[in-house]
Amino acid sequence: MGRDRHPRPTRTMTEPPAVRWMLIGAALLFLGVFLLLPLAAVFANAIARGIEAYVAALREPDALAAIRLTLLTAAIAVPLNLVFGVAAAWAIAKFEFAGKNLLITLIDLPLSVSPVVSGLIYVLLFGLQGLLGPWLAAHDITIIFALPGIALATIFVTLPFVARELIPLMQSQGSEEEEAAMTLGASGWQTFLRISLPKMKWGLLYGVVLCNARAMGEFGAVSVVSGHIRGRTTTIPLHVEILYNEYQFAAAFAVASLLTLLALVTLAVKAVVEAHSQRTSVG
Amino acid sequence: MGFTLLYLSLIVLIPLAAIVYKTTSLTWDQFWHAVGDPRALAAYRLSFGASLIGAVINLVFGLLVAWVLVRYTFPGKRLVDMLVDLPFALPTAVAGISLTAVYAPNGWIGRYLEPLGIKAAFTPLGVVVALTFEGLPFVVRTVQPVLQDLEAEFEEAAASLGAGRLQIFARILLPSLVPPLLTGFTLAFARGVGEYGSVVFISGNMPMRTEIAPLLIVTKLEQYDYAGATAIALVMLAASFVLLLTINLLQAWTRRGHRP
């Protein structure tokens, strides 16, 4: 990006044009093969059977049920992780306490655990054979192979995203303005709403959008806890898998194109947020 | 503060403890049998091996992409920069089916590999392709900021003393890039080891040959072998902890390295 802090490189400071273009070409070829082709393949395959087949695949009852379940899951997971992310970032950035690094590591943990393991832990806790299984069965509560399990696994997998965007942001901003507001008699909530929230809104926006994209697209963890009951416990990614395994490729890609569009929107939001935060940090 | 800890405990810590608890219900013999059986060993080998190869590919090309994005200007650069994060945002299942479509024998790339005798989809090579895709942003995004903040003075000094570009790169730039490169490499590797969604479509899932460790956990769960699944999950979890620790140390090193 155009953050030229140094004067333009002089001739001795850069490579000859031939080398430069060769390096650019190699980088673009690599990205083309690994990123652009798969991206284009989603849309090309989605409309391979024509626009009507595309629309039909999206309007089919099982697809609509999957879309509804995905929206519902995201509507549960994203707000919870938003509140957690703000609270965690607040605690880490504004207070000093023992074990802070451990806390940060724990928040990052879901990122390095295999999604399959993330799903498995809830099966072990709440499944029929699980620790709490007999008790839950006796009280007629189902968590695994139902919405609560899907929501829990999604919350686990997307837990770090809001917190990770906010922690570095709030740490670099410091807390002088908040302290000033407090000494002028503002309450904790007032300080938060009037001072802290406006300062972190861009980071917050990207965190939420990324969290939402991951919540809607999570496959491994949800696949373990969902039970794949068609039209009832299948989210959009699981519906894609079912269609694909039934050799309904065009329909699978049509449904997948929804998630791809969501991913592209997420990337666009990131670009906008970065442009804004750079402008404010420079200005 | 209290809320943060409570939420973390409920969502992350207690469920993870369930894995350890469940494993203790196995005898040592049962545990070793599940963890060390030939099919499990083949799955670890594939998961770790393919992740390693994918991470090495990303190490080389990630540095190249970061370099090109920071140092040169070319048309469409902002778009390319934006696209690098695609693997973070694209659901793994979507990546899996589209990579399979591209690399299958009749796919856009697969059809040119086929005459050369290279089969990508449904072979271990396909696993490497999927893991390279998933790990692509990590090296770029760890190297890019460090490369941006490097002071030009040392390069200028070296150039004025008569050093060539390659010499400057190897002696002056590379040493400061080693910590972020290693961080990105480990992040990509860690991501690959646990990856499931993108791999299951392209790999073909043949036991002993193209079955990754997370898939083996799922297979065992589907056969109601909860103990066996948990034992392998514990191995994977231990690997995640070690990698997470390594990443934290490397990140601390990176911060120390490029503090002005």
Image: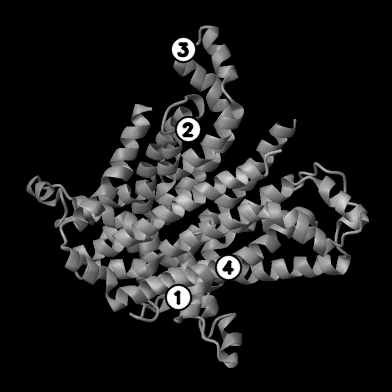
Nearer-the-camera pick, B140 or B74 = B140
Q: Which mark is residue A89?
A: 2
Q: Is residue B148 visible?
A: yes
Label 2 neighbour load within 10 Å: few <14, some 14-19, many 20+: many
Residues at marks 3 and 4 on the same chain: no
Residue that badge 4 annotates? B56
Q: Determine whether, in the image, residue A275 is placed left or right of residue A200.
A: right
The location of residue B87, given as percent across then percent down, is 54, 60
Cβ atoms at labels 4 and 2 below 8 Å apart: no
Q: Is residue A222 visible?
A: no
Nearer-the-camera pick, A238 or B244 = B244
> What chain does badge 4 belong to?
B
Q: Which mark is residue A187?
A: 3
Q: How far is the residue under mark 4 from the one under mark 2?
A: 33 Å
Residue drawn at 56 percent across, 54 percent down: B183
Q: Residue furthest left?
A: A138
SS at mark 4 in the image = helix
Q: How far is the residue under mark 3 from the one under mark 2?
A: 19 Å
Q: Amino acid at mark 3?
A: Ser
Residues at marks 1 and 2 on the same chain: no
